[in-house]
Amino acid sequence: MRSGPHRPAAAYARPLALLSAVLAGLLAGGMVLIEAVLLPFWRSVPPPEFRRWFTANAPRIRTLMVPLGAAAGVAGVASAIADVTTSRRRSPASLTAAAATVGVVAVTVTVNEPANHRFTGGSLTDAETADLLASWARWHHLRVALGVVATVAAASALLPRRP
């Protein structure tokens, strides 16, 4: 049994769009922080020191970023679905935001997280660590770009639509 009045799906579209924009912005902000602060630090220290630091601190970063990425992905997709199913004048912005956020999650799951586990696995040589960090950084640059696109697109989806 339901309690309370039934709200049409359209009533959820705007809150979902706002949630998508906020979460995409937080995710992008976290990735920019990694890009601007942590990555230069990681590159500046010798590989053994990097591996020690990463092993000690990666769980804290993961504790924040993984749920944030998952929530941003779910909110972005939900917002795009709500937009497509409830609006006569669909906005490509919500679809772009969802696709870019899903792209961030896909790169994270397929490239960066497996690399993170290798950094902490204890079997990398110094040369392998340096090569893997360079690859990790290239993929992270893509994640940052996708995160910025997702944020801008999600924010654009909140703007009033022209007739």
Image (tube, rainbow, N blue to C red):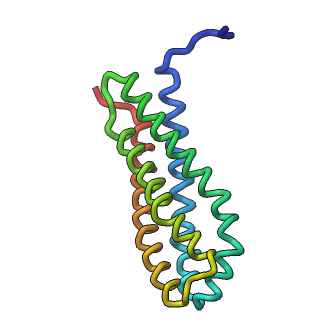
State left or right for residue 46 relative to residue 17. right
The residue at 32%/30% (across/down) is: 90
Relative to residue 49, is residue 17 depicted above or below?
above
Q: Residue 15: percent from the left, percent from the top?
A: 54, 31
Name the quadrant of the N terminus.
top right
Q: Residue 66: percent from the left, percent from the top?
A: 60, 55
The residue at 49%/85% (across/down) is: 128
Q: Furthest residue to the left?
A: 163
The residue at 60%/57% (across/down) is: 65
User: Hey, which quadrant is residue 29 in on the image?
Assistant: bottom right
Q: Residue 130: percent from the left, percent from the top?
A: 49, 85
Instruction: Pick whichever, 25 or 61, lies toward us.
Output: 61
Count of numbered tags = 0
Instruction: Pick whichever, 36 or 44, lies toward us.
Output: 44
Relative to residue 98, is residue 3 depicted above or below?
above
Name the quadrant of the C terminus.
top left
State left or right for residue 50 relative to residue 146. right
State left or right for residue 71 relative to residue 13. right
Instruction: Pick whichever, 65 or 132, lies toward us.
Output: 132
Relative to residue 90, is residue 21 depicted above or below?
below
Q: Residue 75: percent from the left, percent from the top?
A: 52, 39
Instruction: Pick whichever, 127 or 94, lies toward us.
Output: 127
The residue at 63%/80% (across/down) is: 122
Q: Furthest residue to the front?
A: 123
